[in-house]
Amino acid sequence: MDHLDALESQSIYVLREAFNKFDKLMMLWSLGKDSNVMVWLARKAFFGHVPFPVVHVDTEKKFPEMYAFRERYAREWGLNLIVDFCPPIEEMDPTLPPAARSAARKTYGLKNLVAKHGFTAIIAGIRRDEEGTRAKERVFSPRGENAEWDVRDQPPEFWDQYKTDFAPGTHLRIHPLLHWTELDVWRYVKRERIPLVDLYFAKSGKRYRSLGDQDITHPVASNAATIDEIIAELETTKVPERAGRAMDHEAEDSFERLRAAGYM
Amino acid sequence: MANAAQHLKITIVGHVDHGKSTLVGRLIYESGSLPDGKYEAIKAMSQRRGMPFEWAFLMDALQAERDQGITIDTTQIRFRTRLRPYVIIDAPGHKEFLKNMVTGAAASDAALLVVDAREGVQEQSRRHGYLLHLLGISQVAVVINKMDLVDYDRKRFDQVASEITQYLCDIGITPSEIVPISAHAGDAIARRTDRMPWYRGATVIETLDRFRLPPDAVDLPLRLPVQDVYKFDDRRIVAGRIESGRLKVGDRLLFSPVNKTARIASIEGWSVRSQPTEAAAGQSVGITLDEHIFVERGQIASHEDRPPVETNVFRARLFWLGHKPLAAGSRYKMKLATAEHQVEVQSVDRVIDVTDLSSRPSQSVARNGVAEITMRARSMLALDEFQRNHRTGRFVLVEGYDIVGGGIVSMEGYPDQRRSLTVKSQNIPNVESQITTEARWRANGHKSGILWLTGLSGAGKTTLAQELERQLFRKGMHVYVLDGDNIRHGLSADLGFSPDDRAENIRRVGEVAALFARAGVVVITAFISPYRSDRDHVRSTAPELFHEIHVKADLAECERRDPKGLYKKARAGQIPDFTGISAPYEPPVSAELVIDTGARDVEGCVADLVEYVGRQFALS
């Protein structure tokens, strides 16, 4: 087994654990590279099927290319797609910096959707290497009654035995890509030929390294127009992946505050 | 998984404030793995807060951590040396966060244990060392940190080094290197400095590069714990991850503990160029079978010739994370591979003090404690000894919603019950005798059955059996004693005294006793028969004829009597697996009769037995 095989096998194990343990299970699909890899892994784990709903929490501010991508592949991959919308920004915590406040809409959109459908487990495509607080995550990570994350008292997690029991009213976040890196994702996309939105590929010296809402996501300077060029770029770059995500950089703890409140 | 670019996962453990986070920060910086601007950003942040720059800040992206000054959770950081990439799992040293340390360390291939040169070996240094051993992490190196604060004194280094080496050797860990460093000043991290000219050993980075990648589990016997069974379409796919060994299409698989077999018809795959025909350890697979046998999550598939152990009782070395102490008699949900079972703590055998490795008897294990316990399950389990297979030889306990402990399995003193469960000669019809047992009873003038005497060596089984036989014979009854003398020399002459052999001996005695009883004889057996499972098995072969009689005397009394001088030899270590001393005795839970030989003399005890036989064996 090579490195990618080992990552794939571990993720499949996690997805199968989640599917076995939870009836009210769903997968978040943000339309970005990581969540496409995650849907792909689910199809591998379940032999061509995705046996739970795939949910897009829509801010209605995504790039048009992303919406087109969603419609096409939901159909081609036979996904049980649920789209739900986020509350307006006026309802968000006004003490948050502007971009974080905008991102918080997604937290509340997700909370409403979870309540509406009674989901008890949410599969999300976050990775440890993306950002400091995500580095501390568990694979099966409990959330409180208000979806809050208690980073100070996380459950033990060892020997691939996960927390699968939880109190009524709380839910679990399941992170099958937690152990992947950005480079791993790109190498896997290449090996498996997984389709992606073409905003990731450079046009006129700029490309998106991470995709969020149009108003709070900025392209980075790059000439990498193919997967191979992106891989070569990432092998040498020291620019962090989320450099183009405004909400991470407004204040040193803004992303942490978002996550503690239930952001992905 | 041999691959040049394979990551090595290392964990850094040690007592609180001995400098783990500083070391990690320094390692990342010196290996050139920091993202641009990170070092400067954190320096600026420190200045803004009016604090001196600390290397540990590099990792502590969380506000709460900086405020408290301790790492509150496991963090994973990547860096690479010229040799290969690493994932560092930074585990906290604070006592309260042992669960995080376990979380981090359990996922590692190797460990660095950090010890402060000034403070020397502290409680958490020992506890973490012990847990590494318990978690099965065999590659450990020590770094003696803060050498700058002891003036790079070689004598101090030697002192601390010998102290920690002694402790680790006592628990079975041989440190690969002991490196004097200053994480703060940067000595012996990436290069040796002239501040410690006396040190010519490996740097921390060289030490890391000398660790080996984990060995493949493909050469161990096949273990495929069933994770799920899918019926999304016309295929019935058994899904799971191969934990060890390999399999191929056509192999006959044995599913334990149900002991059903079937052949692999196919290995399924999605988005693969061609259907695979074989698979090996580490792969998450799906297979179809040639026969529709009962398969469900929790079973372990193996090849028939090297199956896992089957048992409902086992020993474990355990670390406890629960707020409520673990106590004898408590019940928990146990997760082992993909199986879940209800288990009860039969006994807490000893609680280990990790600071001096002494142990003491106790009825309970407190939070963050380590102990040896005996567990009993309501149902039959399939498992391996941890020594033989890590992945199917370890488990976690769940109480309420939480994982509260982890343990590793030992079968020391207990037999594999597979043999007594598995009927090898199938397809042999039961030949019904023309003469019923009841007809024999009428001819003999009394009922028949098995009087199964069980108890410690020296409790008085043989004495009582022989006297009872004499008295019943005089009353004209058909009676016979089976004991070690007439069984061990003939029927079981091929067996020794290991747990497996003892279990097999008892199985044979049980079968013979059942034949005697069906032939109309009152059979008295006099065997220690220490395992409840063995006695229960005999009972199940002839439930209507079986009478379990506990010949009771406490260990001290038996040892005082010591009629054959065996206890003396056992205490001297000359007899291994001696019941009561180095092997367990499990008293009956619901014996038909208890004879307390400590409280009554032989005459009185035999009178009780004769009275019992008179009541139970008379024809109505």
Image (cartoon, rainbow, N blue to C red):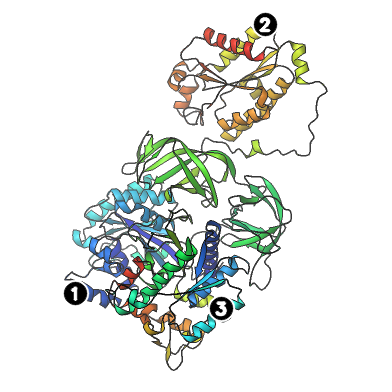
> Residue B475 shows which numbered tag?
2
Q: Earlier in the sequence, mark 1 or mark 2?
A: 1
The residue lying toward the viewer, choosing from A26 and B524, is A26
Asked if the residue under mark 2 is in contact with the one under mark 1, i.e. CB atoms within 8 Å, the reply is no
For image coordinates 36% across by 73% down, the residue present is: A104
In the rendering, at what x and y percent does residue B483 appear? 62, 20
Give the spatial CA distance, label 1 vs label 2: 101 Å
Instruction: Give the image quarter of residue A50.
Output: bottom right
Give amino acid for label 3: Ile
Q: Chain of mark 3?
A: A
Q: CA distance from mark 3 to mark 1?
A: 45 Å
Q: Which mark is residue B48?
A: 1
Q: Is residue A187 left or right of residue B321?
A: right
Task: Tell me the chain of label 2.
Answer: B
According to the picture, the residue beneath numbered tag 3 turns out to be A194
Q: Position of residue B250 (x, y in %)?
A: 72, 58
